[in-house]
Image (spheres, rainbow, N blue to C red):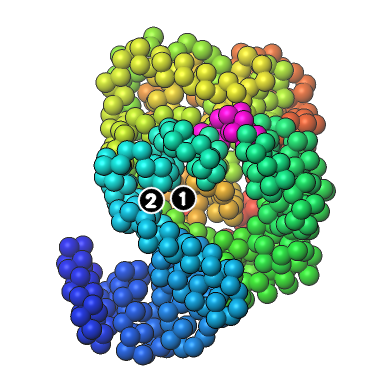
Amino acid sequence: MTLDISGRAEQLHQAQKRLQSGDFAGSLSAAEAMLASAADDTDVLYLAAVAARYVKDYPKAEQYLQRLHTASPEYGRAWQEAGHLARAKNDQDKALQAFRRATRFNPALEASWRAQADLLATGGSQSESAAATAQADRLKDMPRELLAATNHLHEGRLLRAEEFCRHFLRQNPKHVEGMRLLAQIGIKLGILDDAEFLLDSARSFEPDNIQVRLDYIDALRRRQKFAEAKQEAEALYALDPDNPLFQSHLAIESMQTGEYNRAFALFDQILETIPGDPATLTSRGHALKTTGKSEQAVASYQAAFAHKPDHGDAYYALANLKTYRFSDAEISNMRAQLDRPDLAFMDRVHFSFALGKAYEDAGDYQQSFRYYDEGNTLKRRQTRYDADAMQGELERQAECCTADLFARHAGAGHPAPDPIFILGLPRAGSTLLEQILASHSEVDGTLELPNILALAHRLRGRKAGEALYPAILHDLTADQLAKMGEDFIENTRIHRQGAPFFIDKMPNNFRHIGLIKLILPNAKIIDARRDPMDCCFSGYKQLFAEGQEFTYGLEQVGRYYRDYVTLMDHWDSVLPGAILRVEHEDVLDDVEGQTRRMLDYLALPFEDACVNFHQSKRAVRTASSEQVRRPINRDGVAAWKPFEPWLDPLKDALVM
């Protein structure tokens, strides 16, 4: 039987006091007793590892650290403790490696920087030692509240980090590092407009602060203000056109604004200065893939891991083309990299998903599932997705967004008919529908736009943890709804090329159809739906750049699909006829018929270009980019079948 939260906290506190008082054996004993009922508790595992080291039971300390790394692979203090343990065992190389990992995951660990400085100096690396000392000294001089906030931020305690940071800024409102830190917290919480404002203010106070300017560019990109982000990157580049960091940022921002030739020229400049730079080669590969130059993209990815064999990102990028087949030598190298205990966390994730794809293509489904499962398990531990919380969020939408709500707001909102929302689950065929419709002369394809999600976040309340939305929809005035709709139209204009209609294919917008129809009553909504087993298992096999945390477990993705269907049924009942449902399998069976059906719903004339969508030259940025450049095929239908022996958790979740 597990302890209640308050009882566990008190026991942990008492065990920590024993450690601090020098009763190491007593602290270890108390920690082990707690682990009997909470085997993966990271705080207790950390305490047990420290106490075991102090009593010089190094094998036991190592065991607890391995469990801690498994439970929380990016926990900086765990790697710091691994460094202390390695030093105690006189393994200086392993210690240095561990301390470096510690500061990569949590750069606020002063002890790890000082340990690195000492070890590097002993090894004769004086310049690196001096750099580590400088980092440690910077932390020593940092205001205590900001140091605490930085620690909380990098250990995932965002609300505590925000609390410390805001308290400090109330006393020091123009402290640039404090503003930058609060902006980082805001980005993690999804409060992007606040982050942009803070960083804009910070750069006005310190115009020469390069890190603030780089963070500002990142915030603008996340808000998909691509033209402004590129303008800022241009300004940095003008300061030093030979700086590879500035060249790289400008290349990325040029990609976002569709200036791919400029991006390619900048990538070439970087590679002249840093030949074989794997990050640049991988980014160039992404740009080539997006513009349909798949053979050149493959060559760029292969060049990246030729220069850095443990660069998992490039291997996964090849897998993510969906059309690439790995050679035996590439598979062998990936397996060899996974055998390395020092392999970086995200490289391990990338190799796992890539090997899953490699063995699936080879027809070895047991091995394939093994690697998909390993990759998903790593990501699930990292993201800590809560299926119950998501179910509650979707249920609140149904509770608040009633037929009466829409009746009371009839006639409100912004009247623009421009937006076409394609939504549902990822891997449900939405990119195919977008490619079909964007081939029409009156429809612009754009991106998975974050605007609706950002608006929903703002409506929740300005303080982290508040949850005014969706109930607040009942309190909004007609003028407020109209202004929100108008802002959406204006803020998304940058993504359009002049057609009267445009597509927003953010799949998660299905959660906010009520909000969409209140602010944009004439918007069209297409629900892209796919067979549940195909859709869910395809999502499970996909490593997403960010978000979509529900896909990293079979039970979790099954529950999410079930909750999505339940909410869509609700939208159909309170907004009858407002949503067009398009089944992926129907499109595969009759692409012209389903295309005509969609165009009729949109009140647009039929155009042959829509059924010849695969001939379009437009850039496609999603995981399906290569697939939608081929004619219709049924390759993905029933792709889950060979994996059926391992999919019972998914089946059970779908029928619960």
* Tag 2 near tag 1, CB within 8 Å: yes
Q: Quadrant of residue 466?
A: top left
The residue nearer to you, when weighing 304 against 371, is 304
Q: Which residue is mark 1?
A: 550
Task: Determine crowd level at label 1: few under 14, some 14-19, many 20+ residues with C-alpha closer than 10 A.
Answer: many
Which segment is the magenta one? 221-234
Q: Does the magenta segment cover residue 95?
A: no
Label 1: which secondary element: helix
Q: CA distance from mark 2 to mark 1?
A: 7 Å
In the rendered image, residue 381, in percent from the top left (x then y), is placed at: 44, 62
Q: Residue furthest bottom?
A: 56
The residue nearer to you, when weighing 363 against 70, is 70
In the rendered image, residue 115, in percent from the top left (x then y), is placed at: 46, 74
Mark 2: amino acid: Ala
Lateral position of residue 379 relative to residue 4, left or right:
right
Nearer-N-terminus badge (2/1): 2
| Residue at image coords 31%, 24% | 473
Q: Which residue is mark 2?
A: 387
In the rendered image, residue 579, in percent from the top left (x then y), is placed at: 50, 24
Chief SS of the magenta region: helix
